[in-house]
Image (cartoon, helix red, strand yellow):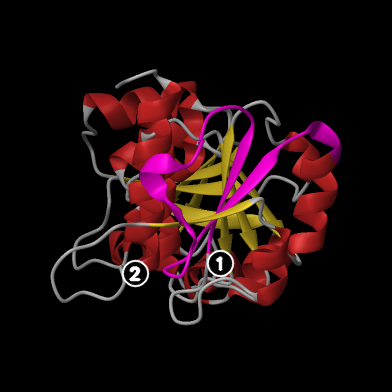
C-alpha cells in the first residue's frame, strides 16, 4: 500500500522534526536518511527502514526502483516541494528513508575487535567523519559518550557518507558503562592525547581494543585519562600544536589498522 502526502500534514511535520530536533528523533526512535550511498548501506547492513519517501516522479532510476520494490517498508509518495524540504535541497531527492535507531546496548559491540569511543563531541560532522574513518580502518563499533552531539543528526549521517551504518553505534552516559563492558572482556583502552607519554608508533594497538578520542576543545575527561591503559600522542612537525579530534582519531585508527594487518 502506498500513502500519498500532498500537504504539510502531521506525518510531514513529524518527519520534518527529525531534521533538527534530537529530542523528537530519540522519542520516536527514528531518523531521516538522505542520499544513495547512506540509504543503500542502511539496507545492506540490516538497519530497520520504517518508510521510504518518493516525490512521485514518473520514472525512477534503476537504483530507486530496486529499493522501492524490494525494501520491506511503508511507501510514501509526497509532493515534490515537500520532499525538497526534507531533502534540505532546492530539488527533491529521488528517495528518502526513515530509519529506526538501534538500542543503546553495549553488549551489541564486538569485544574481540576494535571499537572507537568519541567522548563528548560537540560537532555532528566530526562524529560522521570519525565514523567514516572507523569503517575504513576496520573498526566495528562507535560509542559516543557523555553530553554530546547526536550521531543520528543528518549532518553526522551525511559526513559519514553512510559508514555509520557499517558500524555498531551506541550512546553511553559516561566512561563507566564502557569500562563495565570492556574490563570483564579483557579489552584494552588506549586514549589519544597531545600530552600522551607513548608515541603512537610505539603503542601496541593489536588485539581487543578501545580507542578513545576526546572532545574537540578539552580532550578527554580526567576520568577517561585515568581509565586508559595507555595515553598515546601523535608526533607532529611544523607549527601545529594539535589536530582536529576526528582527524587525530583517524590517524590513530590508521596506525591500528597497519599493526593489525601485520604491516612493517
Q: Of residues 148 and 183, which is closer to you in this image? A: 183
Residue 180 spot, x, y in % from top left: 85, 49
Q: Residue at x 67, y 26 (%)?
A: 112
| Location of mark 2 (residue) | 85
Query: Picture coordinates of residue 197 (x, y %)?
Result: 49, 60
Q: Residue at x 34, y 39 (%)?
A: 254
Going by the picture, which residue comes out furthest to the left? 238
Label 2 CA crowd tier, 10 Å (few <14, some 14–19, many 20+) = some
Residue 207 falls within the magenta-colored stretch: yes
Q: CA distance from mark 1 to mark 2?
A: 21 Å
The quadrant of the picture occupied by the N terminus is top right
Vertical position of residue 139 compared to residue 5: above or below: above
Residue ranking furthest to the bottom: 217
Q: Residues within 10 Å of mark 1 (few under 14, many from 20)?
A: many
Q: Quadrant of residue 83?
A: bottom left
Q: Is residue 222 left or right of residue 195?
A: right
As for residue 251 lying within the magenta part, the answer is no
User: Where in the figure is residue 65, as x and y percent of width and height?
Assistant: 32, 27
How many marks on residues? 2
Q: Position of residue 159 (x, y in %)?
A: 33, 56
**In this view, the mark in front (1 or 2):** 1
SS state under label 2: helix
Q: Residue at x 51, y 36 (%)?
A: 204
Position of residue 165 relative to residue 263, above or below, is below
Viewer-proximal residue among 128 and 51: 128
Above or below, 134 relative to 17? above
Comparing 191 with 247, the one in front is: 191
| Horizontal relation, residue 197 to residue 168: left or right | left
Q: Quadrant of the C terminus?
A: top left
Q: Which region shows up in magenta?
A: 184-213
Q: Residue at x 43, y 36 (%)?
A: 256
Q: Which disc is residue 150 wearing? A: 1
Amino acid at each position: 500500500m502506498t500513502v500519498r502526502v500532498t500537504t504539510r500534514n502531521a506525518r510531514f511535520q513529524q518527519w520534518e522534526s527529525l531534521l533538527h530536533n534530537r529530542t523528537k528523533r530519540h522519542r520516536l526512535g527514528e531518523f531521516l536518511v538522505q542520499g544513495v550511498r547512506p540509504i543503500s548501506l542502511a539496507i545492506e547492513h540490516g538497519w530497520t527502514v520504517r518508510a521510504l519517501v518518493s516525490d512521485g516522479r514518473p520514472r525512477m532510476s534503476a537504483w530507486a526502483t530496486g529499493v522501492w520494490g524490494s525494501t520491506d517498508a511503508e511507501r510514501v509518495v509526497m509532493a515534490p516541494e515537500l520532499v525538497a524540504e526534507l531533502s534540505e535541497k532546492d530539488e527533491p531527492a529521488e528517495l528518502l528513508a526513515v530509519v529506526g535507531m538501534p538500542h543503546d546496548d553495549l553488549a551489541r559491540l564486538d569485544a574481540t575487535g576494535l571499537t572507537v569511543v568519541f567522548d563528548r563531541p560537540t560537532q555532528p560532522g566530526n562524529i560522521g567523519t570519525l565514523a567514516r574513518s572507523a569503517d575504513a580502518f576496520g573498526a566495528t563499533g562507535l560509542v559516543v559518550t557523555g553530553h554530546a552531539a547526536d550521531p543520528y543528526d543528518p549532518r553526522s549521517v551525511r559526513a559519514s557518507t553512510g559508514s555509520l551504518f557499517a558500524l555498531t553505534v551506541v550512546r553511553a552516559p559516561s566512561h563507566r558503562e564502557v569500562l563495565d563492558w570492556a574490563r570483564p572482556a579483557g579489552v584494552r583502552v588506549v586514549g589519544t592525547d597531545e600530552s600522551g607519554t607513548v608515541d603512537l608508533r610505539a603503542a601496541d594497538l593489536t588485539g581487543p581494543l578501545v580507542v578513545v578520542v576526546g572532545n574537540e576543545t578539552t580532550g578527554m575527561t580526567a576520568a577517561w585519562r585515568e581509565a586508559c591503559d595507555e595515553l598515546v600522542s601523535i608526533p607532529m612537525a611544523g607549527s601545529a600544536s594539535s589536530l582536529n579530534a576526528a582527524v587525530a582519531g583517524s590517524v590513530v585508527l590508521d596506525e591500528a589498522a597497519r599493526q593489525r594487518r601485520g604491516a612493517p
